[in-house]
């Protein structure tokens, strides 16, 4: 028992990190209604900068030199965007490390600068976008900063620098409270730091009008401007504040964890922020500490004998605290939004797609032709693209049509793939190269495929349940908990998914009606089998036509009605709950098909492929292509890393750093949100003529008046 | 346009008395003008009614005045400064209060917080303005701690009015003042607006569907139809020239039906 | 005569506040009933309660002969108890026509399958109902527009048309004339009476006394959640209690007169232009 108690208390260490991140997330949310998935990345980038300053004395600015250094450009030597500034001179080993206080100051300024950049370049342009647009913007921030970390700092762990008190080597409290266990001293210091941060930020909001004017300006920009508040100033100030808290958290926790991981800790921070209802600073701090403690205590419990083997400790640690928060939110939520709920804002248009069958099949057919004209490498690229397209259809239905921001669909793909593998496996070695063999039921291909889809639908409906009462951006955060549940409780779970699930999970050979349709070509030992391409084209075509028809029909209309206004939808006789579940079901089925196709394509799967940020990147590209239309999914599928477009460009630019591809993609996301109002490249195409005309007719600086129109429409 | 007031009388009004001065204004949405060539002014201590059928462009005129919409042509001057499209909050800080058609309340905040956000000036002035506004709209007193989103339609309208009044505005623009209000409240509110103009010297521009009630308190009125001012004159003159007034309304109406 | 809607002791409480306090009210089948009262009296809350948007704490509501207490909002709508909203609450990214179609078509559990294969049939009966609703609200010319492009007054009418498209037995209108000018609200009044000829009963909340007094068969007056008076328009107009709580000394009077006069004018010009 005392062990459990000590474990609970020791959890305040990690809890303090969640609390600090949660505080910053709440600040940013209050300032501009954005849930910043990139918040942890800001902390991470600052932590890296701190370490780099202490060790080498140079500061890396958060951008890369856009003028590429390859091909003939290399000879031109026009690298004219400064990236690295040498601030401290650490060549002298005797004078040692640069001044600590000064370093901290520089780093905090750096994070404030990041905040300003985010405000001006990302979230200010996005201020009139729908919730989803803002979510995507913050995913863009995450992807961008992560790739900047990889480019500048190499992404390795950093250990030695900084504050002794917060270092885990700082010693331990022996025999804590006479319970006979030890707790690292640093845990208490970190706890104290979190409380201090909470009090400072809370007081700032409580004792000045800054707090309520911030909330007011975020909720109704027009109203705030009419009362004489500058909404942009308030939002910018909050971004700076939020980023400074992130930077401080990053520096303090440099020793607790690796910087690259801090970006992922944002999930805990999001949980904490949810606990504070996204608005309360003390609530977020308390939530963070509770998450830390429950997680630590939960792991302790899994040490007990009676603990069932089928529930892995890591899953318990990550998922259980979030589950508690979901329950709280669910019970607090309403079946229909009550009167005067804050408006969700404008949604991207979702026009009907006509002549679908011919269009979709023609487009995909051309892709097949093209791929065969090129070398066999293109077969692999084509199939990657097609699978991404199929997956993105699931997002089109759920997010584009129904407006439910679910981040779990990619995990559902993974779940379906793993279930299918387990059902088909028979304990035999499948390929020479396989490391492990999986035991299983040895089901035939088609049966296992259908069963995997059924499992995915059931799971999808389960995830859909919270959506009946939790909405918008809160739902987005809640679905992250489901992502964690899938990854840690279901996939990384040998008793459930077989031995392969914790290493490389070998995929069986799919056999549809006597035809081998796997992507792995035993002759070339590559994934370039042409029948698989054909098979995928048929599947992608069928699903695409189905999705487009769905939009044209009554269900599509009803989905859009729910997306726009649930209260009015119910008044129009729509069973909102049933329609939402239907959407989750259809979307999950499509995601499951995509998952099974990945298993067909590759000789082995790894759980990492289905972790959260893979799914976020796919969502981001679907959004870039256009989340509301079938064409958007097709464009989006071509854009992903490994898809047709980047690979095609890659041919011409030898080897681009993949970090840079992501960074460019992230920039594309933000630009897209601005240029197309988040409606995606695909819709832009059809409107191109119209918009250009309108632009020509308009006076040059009229751009912002258009924003105001949107805003009016929103209110 | 029909101008019932003789040219000379409007000329004699000295220009620096005009708190709001709109000249040859065209404005609209997405680059398409929905109001054209609007000329309008509001002087110190004056209540001006802006009338006209639905879709005439009244809201558009007000939005442009407070800087929420960009003028396509012409100029808008508020309190001596050109109305600032890129920063409407600056115009507000000069002393302009605008109750927009959609009210733009902060639904997530309580009634009290909504009101506090409207306060401006020194502490003592703030308190006085706050109390005065609540005395004018006593129905709000018991609702202080309710979230604004939960209020009934009419209560929201009162809150929007009160929020504009607590700032002791020098210029007050009210769009659809009686929207959703019970007749008895409308009856009380209009004289209040009159008193404010008289006592504080503020200029008031109101858009109102109840033409006769509006004309009872207004000094002057403009009637808009299809984006243009088709009639202007003093309130007494307009009350007398009932026929012209109705023609300008119904004319707009009939055109719309047949087009 | 039967009542399409009947409430008995209907009570709604928010915290300590009785927004509706033992309300007994009846809408006879085929009649036009009005509900007026000061701001915050509980009129919208009453509609919310009988359509299932807020829970009732006591009392019961009988619609079309059945107790509807346990029904969900969408079930009530499907049964023919259809409302509009005081705040607009339209489907902003569907065209005006699609707004109506959503409400007009029923769905079955298999509709999504037939939709996916594009097999769902167009129902001429329903389409013509939608055309009728657009027509009667004068929205034909904007059927393909987005609601946000319309002026405020017409957006309200889209809400009414959407309710009509759902084939209501009783249509509950919450301030449909708010923001309409006097002439338009009288045109609307004419159309509202017409609803009665299409197997509908009408329940109207509005502050435009010109409209309410001219279209209603019977009027209830609510104040602080309680019914303080009820009667024919003439009785209500004369009632001192109503005058004190709601109409005021002159405003209601002027409105009423203005409404009647404008209505006369409108009929003349309307006939002229025909
Ligand atoms: N956001 C918008 N986008 C495009 N057109 C608009 C928009 N808002 C208004 N309009 C158009 O501009 C014209 C004038 O509208 P405005 O709202 O100014 O009229 P109004 O006189 O205030 O009418 P009401 O009495 O109905 O409020 C109308 O024809 C309307 O359709
Ligand atoms: N969910 C809620 N919680 C607390 N109070 C509420 C809630 N909903 C409504 N109220 C209050 O109940 C009262 C009745 O509101 P209701 O909207 O029914 O008034 P109304 O008669 O429709 O007024 P109006 O004519 O102004 O629209 C108001 O004082 C309102 O503030
Ligand atoms: Mg208007
Ligand atoms: Mg109401």
Image (cartoon, coloured by chain):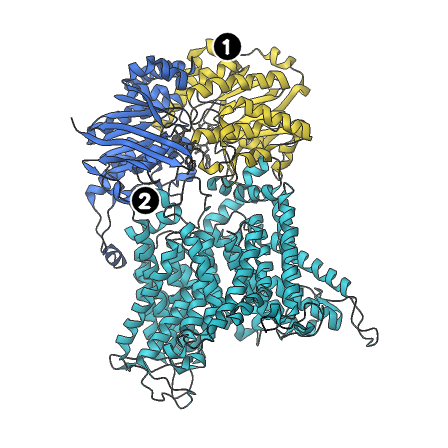
Name the residue tied to disc 1.
Answer: B237
Q: Is residue B250 left or right of residue A44?
A: left
Chain A appears what colour? cyan
Q: Nearer the viewer, residue A692 or A244?
A: A244
- Chain displayed in yellow: B
Return the x and y of residue C259 as percentages of the image width and height.
Answer: 36, 17
Label 1 marks which chain's residue?
A: B
Q: Residue A570 shows which numbered tag?
A: 2
Q: Quadrant of the C terminus of chain C?
A: top left
Does residue B101 appear anywhere in the picture? yes
At horizontal 53% and vertical 27% (from top left) the residue drawn is B161
Count neighbours of disc 2 (C-alpha within 10 A) and say few if under 14, some if 14 to 19, many if 20 or more: many
Task: Measure how far apart labels 2 and 1 are at the Cα level.
Answer: 51 Å
Return the x and y of residue A612 as percentages of the image width and height.
Answer: 48, 67
- Chain displayed in blue: C
Q: Nearer the viewer, residue A514 or B139?
A: B139
Ligand 2 appears in which quadrant? top left
Q: Residue A458 shows which numbered tag?
A: none
């Amino acid at each position: 028992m005392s062990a459990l108690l000590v474990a609970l208390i020791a959890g305040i260490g990690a809890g303090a990190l969640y609390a600090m991140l949660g505080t910053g997330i709440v600040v940013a949310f209050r300032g501009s209604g954005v849930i910043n998935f990139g918040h942890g990345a800001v902390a991470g980038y600052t932590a890296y900068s701190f370490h780099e300053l202490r060790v080498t004395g140079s500061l890396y600015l958060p951008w890369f030199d856009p003028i590429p250094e390859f091909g003939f450009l290399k000879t031109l030597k026009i690298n004219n965007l400064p990236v690295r500034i040498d601030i401290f001179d650490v060549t002298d080993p005797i004078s040692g490390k640069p001044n600590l206080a000064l370093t901290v100051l520089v780093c905090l300024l750096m994070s404030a600068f990041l905040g300003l950049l985010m405000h001006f370049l990302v979230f200010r342009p996005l201020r009139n976008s729908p919730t989803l647009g803002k979510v995507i913007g913050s995913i863009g921030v995450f992807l961008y900063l992560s790739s900047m970390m990889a480019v500048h700092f190499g992404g390795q762990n950093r250990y030695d620098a900084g504050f002794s008190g917060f270092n885990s080597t700082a010693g331990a409290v022996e025999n804590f409270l006479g319970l006979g266990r030890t707790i690292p001293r640093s845990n208490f210091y970190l706890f104290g730091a979190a409380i201090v941060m909470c009090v400072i930020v809370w007081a700032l909001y409580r004792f000045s009008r800054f707090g309520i004017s911030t909330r007011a300006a975020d909720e109704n920009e027009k109203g705030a401007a009419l009362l004489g508040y500058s909404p942009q100033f308030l939002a910018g100030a909050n971004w700076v504040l939020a980023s400074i808290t992130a930077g401080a958290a990053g520096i303090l926790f440099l020793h607790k964890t690796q910087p690259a991981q801090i970006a992922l800790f944002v999930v805990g921070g999001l949980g904490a922020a949810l606990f504070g209802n996204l608005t309360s600073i003390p609530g977020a701090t308390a939530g963070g500490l509770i998450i830390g403690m429950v997680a630590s205590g939960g792991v302790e419990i899994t040490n007990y004998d009676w603990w069932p083997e089928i529930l892995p400790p890591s899953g318990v640690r990550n998922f259980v605290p979030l589950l508690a928060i979901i329950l709280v939110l669910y019970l607090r939520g309403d079946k229909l939004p009550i009167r005067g709920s804050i408006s969700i804002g404008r949604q991207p248009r979702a026009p009907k797609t006509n002549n679908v069958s011919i269009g979709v099949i023609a487009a995909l057919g051309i892709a097949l032709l093209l791929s065969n004209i090129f070398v066999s490498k293109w077969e692999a690229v084509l199939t990657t693209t097609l699978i991404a397209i199929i997956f993105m259809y699931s997002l089109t239905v759920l997010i584009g049509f129904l407006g439910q921001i679910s981040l779990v669909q990619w995990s559902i793909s993974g779940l379906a793939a793993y279930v299918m593998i387990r059902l088909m496996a028979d304990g035999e070695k499948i390929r020479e190269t396989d490391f492990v063999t999986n035991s299983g039921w040895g089901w035939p291909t088609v049966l296992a495929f259908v069963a995997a889809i059924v499992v995915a639908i059931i799971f999808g409906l389960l995830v859909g349940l919270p959506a009946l009462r939790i909405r918008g951006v809160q739902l987005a955060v809640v679905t992250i908990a489901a992502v964690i549940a899938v990854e840690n409780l279901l996939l990384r779970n040998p008793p459930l998914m077989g031995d392969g699930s914790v290493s490389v999970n070998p995929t069986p050979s799919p056999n549809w009606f006597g035809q081998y349709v796997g992507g792995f070509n035993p002759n070339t030992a590559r994934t370039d089998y042409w029948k698989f391409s054909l098979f995928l084209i048929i599947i992608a075509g069928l699903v695409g036509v189905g999705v487009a028809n769905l939009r044209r029909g009554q269900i599509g209309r009803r989905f859009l009605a729910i997306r726009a206004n649930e209260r009015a939808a119910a008044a129009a006789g729509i069973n909102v709950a049933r329609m939402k579940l239907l959407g989750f079901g259809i979307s999950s089925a499509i995601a499951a098909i995509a998952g099974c196709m990945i298993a067909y394509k590759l000789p082995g799967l790894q759980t990492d492929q289905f972790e959260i940020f893979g799914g976020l990147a796919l969502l981001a590209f679907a959004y870039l292509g256009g989340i509301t239309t079938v064409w958007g999914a097709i464009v989006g599928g071509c854009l992903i890393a490994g898809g047709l477009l980047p690979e095609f460009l890659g041919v011409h630019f030898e080897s681009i750093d993949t970090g840079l591809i992501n960074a460019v993609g992230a920039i594309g996301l933000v630009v897209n949100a601005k240029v197309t109002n988040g409606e995606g490249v695909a819709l832009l195409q059809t409107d191109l003529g119209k918009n250009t005309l309108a632009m020509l007719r308009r006076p040059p600086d009229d751009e912002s008046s258009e924003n105001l129109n949107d805003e009016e429409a929103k209110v | 346009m029909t101008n019932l007031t003789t040219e000379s009388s409007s000329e004699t009004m000295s220009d620096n008395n005009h708190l709001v001065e709109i000249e040859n204004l065209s404005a609209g949405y997405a680059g398409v003008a929905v109001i054209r060539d609007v000329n309008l002014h509001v002087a110190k201590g004056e209540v001006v009614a802006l009338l006209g059928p639905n879709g005439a462009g009244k809201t558009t005129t007000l939005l442009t005045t407070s800087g929420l919409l960009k003028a396509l042509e012409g100029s808008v001057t508020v309190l001596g400064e050109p109305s600032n499209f890129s920063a409407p909050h600056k115009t507000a800080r000069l002393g302009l209060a605008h109750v927009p058609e959609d009210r733009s309340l902060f639904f997530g905040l309580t009634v009290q917080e909504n009101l506090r956000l409207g306060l401006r000036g020194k502490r003592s002035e703030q308190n006085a303005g706050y109390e005065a506004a609540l005395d004018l709209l006593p129905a709000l007193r018991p609702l202080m701690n309710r979230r604004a989103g939960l209020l009934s339609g009419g209560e929201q309208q009162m809150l929007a009015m009160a929020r504009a009044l607590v700032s002791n505005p020098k210029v007050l623009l009210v769009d659809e003042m009686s929207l959703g209000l019970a007749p008895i409240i409308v009856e009380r509110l209009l004289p209040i607006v009159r008193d404010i103009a008289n006592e504080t010297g503020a200029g008031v521009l109101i858009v109102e569907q109840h033409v006769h009630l509006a004309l009872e308190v207004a000094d002057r009125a403009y009637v808009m139809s299809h984006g243009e001012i088709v009639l202007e004159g003093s309130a007494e003159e307009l009350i007398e020239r009932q026929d012209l007034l109705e023609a300008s309304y119904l004319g707009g109406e009939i055109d719309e039906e047949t087009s | 005569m039967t009542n399409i809607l009947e409430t008995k002791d209907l009570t709604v409480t928010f915290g300590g506040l009785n927004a509706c306090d033992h309300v007994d009210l009846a809408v006879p089948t085929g009649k036009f009933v009005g509900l007026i009262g000061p701001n915050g009296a509980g009129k919208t809350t009453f509609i919310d309660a009988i359509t299932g948007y807020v829970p009732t704490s006591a009392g019961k509501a009988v619609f079309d002969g059945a107790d509807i207490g346990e029904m969900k909002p969408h079930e009530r709508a499907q049964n023919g108890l259809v409302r509009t909203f005081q705040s607009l609450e339209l489907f902003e990214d569907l065209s005006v026509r699609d707004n109506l179609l959503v409400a007009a078509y029923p769905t079955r559990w298999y509709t999504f399958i037939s939709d996916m294969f594009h097999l769902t049939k167009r129902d001429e009966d329903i389409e013509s109902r939608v055309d009728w609703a657009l027509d009667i609200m004068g929205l034909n010319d904007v059927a393909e527009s987005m609601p946000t492009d319309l002026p405020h007054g017409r957006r309200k009418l889209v809400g009414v048309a959407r309710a009509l498209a759902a084939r209501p037995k009783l249509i509950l209108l919450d301030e449909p004339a708010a923001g309409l000018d006097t002439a338009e609200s009288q045109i609307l009044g004419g159309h509202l009476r017409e609803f009665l000829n299409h197997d509908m009963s009408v329940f109207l909340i509005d502050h435009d006394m010109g409209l309410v007094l001219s279209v209603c068969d019977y009027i209830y007056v609510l104040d602080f959640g309680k019914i303080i008076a009820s009667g024919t328009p003439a009785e209500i107009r004369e009632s001192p209690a109503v005058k004190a709580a709601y109409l005021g000394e002159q405003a209601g009077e002027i409105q009423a007169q203005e409404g009647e006069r404008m209505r006369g004018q409108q009929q003349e010009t309307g006939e002229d232009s025909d």
